[in-house]
Image: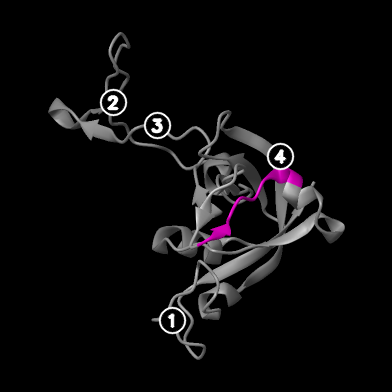
Amino acid sequence: MPRARKRPAGAARPDKKGPGGKRTKTEDPGEASAKVENSSLQETSASRDWGKNLSSYWLMKSEPESRLEKGVDVKFSIEDLRAQPKQTACWDGVRNYQARNFLRAMKLEEEAFFYHSNCREPGIAGLMKIVKEAYPDHTQFEKNNPHYDPSSKEDNPKWSMRSLILF
């Protein structure tokens, strides 16, 4: 079922401190290590404004090929989203706490990549936009749904979902 993951653009492996307080990137075989020496930074107008206008882009994973879960096919592809009224659908069935927290952190109008996962040709299949605040995932309360969670209570739901629209 669809899962949300946030991956910052240009993310690299964590830096490690080397001798003398220098930071060195983790080396990959055949790649020279990059070193950044400590220095005192002067605040400029550019450094004060840095990060204020950054956008978040989300990676929304879904499986486009048929897969049965408790007798129900849980596939959902970009073609399935295109077939929805107004090309809008809820992103339900997320049952991973970190992914749920990412869903809750999303803001209206932020963009998300629709990513086909666990298939012959995985990859980004399209671009979507968040069009509704996080709200309780109704599938957690439906006993016949493969995403039913008997430990979740209607007065304190564990799982959330979002509505997205295809660009």
Name the residue at 63% across, 65% down: 162
Q: Is 104 included in the stretch rendered in magenta?
A: no
Q: Which residues are magenta?
A: 71-79
- Percent position of residue 131, x then y: 74, 62
Under circle 2, the secondary element is: loop
- Percent position of residue 123, x then y: 59, 32
Foreground: disc 1 or disc 3: 1
Three-letter code, disc 2: Glu
In this picture, residue 14 sits left or right of residue 154 = left
Foreground: disc 4 or disc 1: 1
Q: Earlier in the sequence, mark 2 or mark 3?
A: 3
Q: Which residue is mark 1?
A: 152
**Distance between mark 4 and mark 3 Cα atoms:** 24 Å
Q: Earlier in the sequence, mark 4 or mark 2?
A: 2
What is the number of the mark on residue 37? 2
Under circle 1, the secondary element is: loop
